[in-house]
Amino acid sequence: MSAQDIRGKSAIVGMATAGIGEAPGFSAMELLGQAAVAAVADAGLRMQDIDGVFAATSAHAFPTMSVVEHLGLRPRYFDSTNVGGSSFELHLLQATLALEAGLCDAALVCYGSNQRTAGGRLVSMSEPQWHETPYNPRHPITAYGLAASRHMHAYGTTREQLADVALAARGWANLNPDAFARGPLTKDEILSSRMISDPLTKADCCLVTDGAAACVLTRADRAKDLHAKPVYFLGAGAANYHRSIVAMPDLATTAAADSGPRALEMAGITRKDLDLVMLYDAFTINTILFLEDLGFCAKGEGGAFVEDGRIAPGGELAVNTNGGGLSCVHPGMYGLFLIAEAVAQIRGGTGERQIENCDLALCHGNGGTLSSQCTAILGSEATL
Amino acid sequence: MTHTNAIKAGPQATYEHYLEQGKFMIQRAKSTGEYVFFPRAITPTGATDFEWVQAAGTGTVYAITVNRGRSGSTNVALIELDEGVRMMSTLPDVETAPIGARVIARIEEAEGGNRVVFDMLEGEAA
């Protein structure tokens, strides 16, 4: 069996989000539960049909145990792989392997967080790195500030170009009624926003919101019986070289340069075939790094690439059409919301922001401090 | 200066022990000559025959950010030591520094123990 053999072998037949933005009065697990119940209903299944559970959160040491208990499940297969915000792109791959091996028949991938109403700060279970602690880094932003400084030094990337990323995200959010940060935003406002970790300002940072998401996967052969428009798993790839930003080989190049080609090869497509590109934009520099490392432009040209609204509504490349972590939702681990938007676009009917004939989407998850990089490719029935 | 098996402890504890004695020591694999930092058990090529050697102390600013806060600002830098390895540190006496700037280490007493910080090396261009 080769990696290509699992192309198209599973499909997302149920997808839901819950509590995007602010959800006062609900715990992280309650929000996750809402999303899970809605996703299972969307798949036309009963909760008791779920026999595979894949979960990661920032609030639970043993996420699948908590999910199983909360939802009353008795799964045969479960996996709490936690590679930060990229966990869920990897869960799609692991769920597909488990389904294909017959280890489970209906896989639930889920996440939930109430970090905004619980305190308004990014909640992290991330342990301090002993060799960093004496210097008081404020991760994650310190790490991303360091990476941005290096990218600017190596390639002449400017704060104006970072602002273009935030501007494009807001443009898309303004077309998405579910996005948390909507309304007019100018480049001047972004550039004059409070500096937090040079060269990144508050406007270069993702939101701190509540939110939960869940999806249900089955083997492709029964997908059509469960949902009118299954969204097929076509490929995934992962790469990881470091944990601490200190150990990142080149701060201006991420492991997406390896995860992307692996995912595209499994899917048997080229990036020109893609209708939608969902990139984990925890900070504005991420979008530029991932556009380069995934090959949408040459290394070092990401800054110029995002100028003049190229990734904004009406631009050449549809990137982060929900408004991204910057303007739509970011509850701490955003990876499953990339998948939610890809599923919504491929199914169609997202309203003003809908891409015409959206058949192929790339979801790129990022975990840690530019550490774990996981890319997944999803497609409509037409791409099988 | 070379110390092998000077202390029966793991790499982190050994590094911190030297630091408390005012010494900035890093590991080098005898067989391959590779340096590593932070201290650990194996080099990227698989060597484990480490000895502890005094770091030259000179290096270059590889990346730098300034954490801005209400109670003041401090820079956090990644310094590439001349031995070829990278470490997180800070330049306490300047607000920030250009990437590529030459720097030299000193040991500073800090809350929680000694730490290695860096000063600008005057008169040395990047």
Image: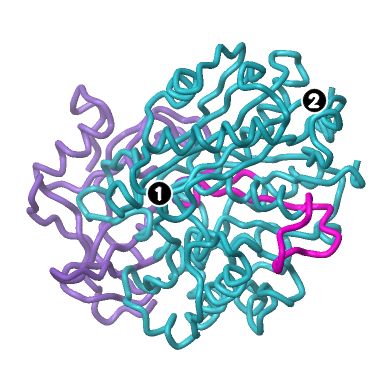
Q: Where B12 falls versus A47 (above or below)?
A: below
Q: Colour of chain B?
A: purple
| Amino acid type of the residue tagged 1 in the rendering | Ala
Judging by the rendered image, the residue that carries numbered circle 1 is A23
Q: Are marks 1 and 2 on the same chain?
A: yes
Judging by the rendered image, the residue that carries numbered circle 2 is A219
Picture coordinates of residue A186, whole percent (x, y): 49, 85
| Amino acid type of the residue tagged 2 in the rendering | Arg
Picture coordinates of residue A16, whole percent (x, y): 61, 42
Secondary structure type for disc 1: loop
Count of numbered labels shown in the rendering:
2
User: Which chain's residue wears label 1?
Assistant: A
Write down the quadrant of residue B107 in the picture: bottom left
Please provide the residue range marked out in magenta: A346-374
Q: Is residue A114 visible?
A: yes
Q: Is residue B100 visible?
A: no
Picture coordinates of residue A96, whole percent (x, y): 73, 27
Q: Colour of chain A?
A: cyan
Q: Where B77 falls versus A236 (above or below)?
A: below
Write down the quadrant of residue A351 in the picture: bottom right
Which residue is depicted at the point 24% across and 47% down? B54
Which residue is depicted at the point 26% across and 30% down? B4
Q: Nearer the viewer, residue A5 or A213?
A: A213
